Image: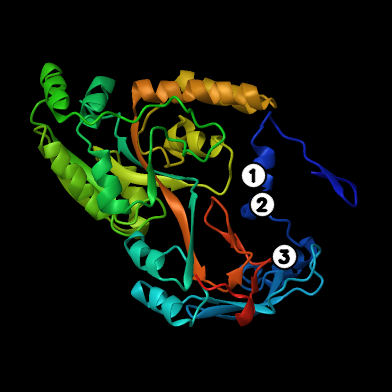
Amino acid sequence: MRKLDNRTVEFSLTRPDASFLWHLATHYASVMSAEYAAKLNKQDRQELLDRQPVGTGPFQLAEYRAGQYIRLQRHEHFWRGTPLMPQVVVDLGSGGTGRLSKLLTGECDVLAWPAASQLTILRDDPRLRLTLRPGMNIAYLAFNTDKPPLNNPAVRHALALAINNQRLMQSIYYGTAETAASILPRASWAYDGEAKITEYNPAKAREQLKALGAENLTLQLWVPTSSQAWNPSPLKTAELLQADMAQVGVKVIIIPVEGRFQEARLMDMNHDLTLTGWATDSNDPDSFFRPLLSCAAINSQTNYAHWCNREFDAVLQKALASQQLSSRIDAYDEAQKILAKELPVLPLASSLRLQAYRYDIKGLVLSPFGNASFAGVDREKEQEVKKP
């Protein structure tokens, strides 16, 4: 990296990477103060870079109580103009129905990530507004392609026919997700509009499994125990998948996997199926394809299907090497067709991003990544609020 002038820097890359600018626009590529970092490094207090951050945003840290709250005060010299709200307090101590109760009583103004099961309450309350946006996330079922008979694409396709996706939409997401036809969410600019959702046909699944000599299978399904951004109830989802598979003569044993032990257990390659998902802060398709399904991702422990396809990897590299959006879209269409044929993973759903807030709050915009900026947020005066 080289400074050209006070407003221009030059990056030299080791190889072409069209996704680089997308990554620079994310929060994890924020510009940090080199002087502040050097000072903390000299004091051996590097952890303060997160706890006492220095940046150029609309608000600055006023107070932080671990596990309780973060108090932000407006940055009077913010480069886009002084924010309207004098302060923002982020409540870290509430969970579950307690968060909803604070919104309903007016103790808080904005509820981030409300549960899908709370949607009816939020929609029916005239004091609240609800925002739903397509999200950059995907829930999927990964087949361990290293283990017979799941190393056979025909078996994977037959098992996919057994999954009742519409029931997942109703019983798990309560209308807060889109049925997935690709590993890319529909919000992605490279999503293949011709992608087909896997047919639900248990009779056909049973027939194909019999023809393949894969009857009476017993498979282990590994599933996280806690709610995820892409799946509000993984264990319940696993139970529904278990029931679907039973209808075609496949016995599924659910293996709950908790917290920090999840990656280590999944990568020991003893599992058959993995219920998992992915969310990204970048709108570049490479942020889905490469971490989840490239050959290199097996060693980096994010390719739970253990699937390696050199043709697929070559297509991804072709997409990264081009600066033409149309060429990249063509390459990613090709990548999605390879995945539809090989089916190392079965896409299930993309969760919508939800946010609820009090009726007098205005200017709050929710991004597809689930975060919101309070830079332009204000509270309407009581006489200005139009009652619904």
Residue that badge 3 annotates: 57
Label 3 or label 2, whichever comes before in sequence order: 2
Task: Say the numbered circle drawn on residue 29.
Answer: 2
Quarter assignment of residue 182: top left
Q: CA distance from mark 3 to mark 1?
A: 18 Å
Q: Position of residue 185 (x, y in %)?
A: 46, 39
Q: Secondary structure at mark 1?
A: helix
- Residue drawn 45% across and 62% down? 113
Task: Say the numbered circle drawn on residue 345.
Answer: none
Q: Position of residue 348 (x, y in %)?
A: 33, 40
Amino acid carrying label 1: it is: His
Label 3 Cα neighbours within 10 Å, binned few <14 / some 14-19 / many ≥20:
some
- Residue drawn 43% across and 42% down? 302
Tell me if I can see residue 81 in this picture.
yes
Label 3 or label 1, whichever comes before in sequence order: 1
Quarter assignment of residue 267: top left
Residue that badge 1 annotates: 23
Q: Secondary structure at mark 3?
A: loop
Q: Position of residue 23 (x, y in %)?
A: 64, 44
Q: Nearer the viewer, mark 3 or mark 1?
A: 3
Q: Nearer the viewer, mark 3 or mark 2?
A: 3
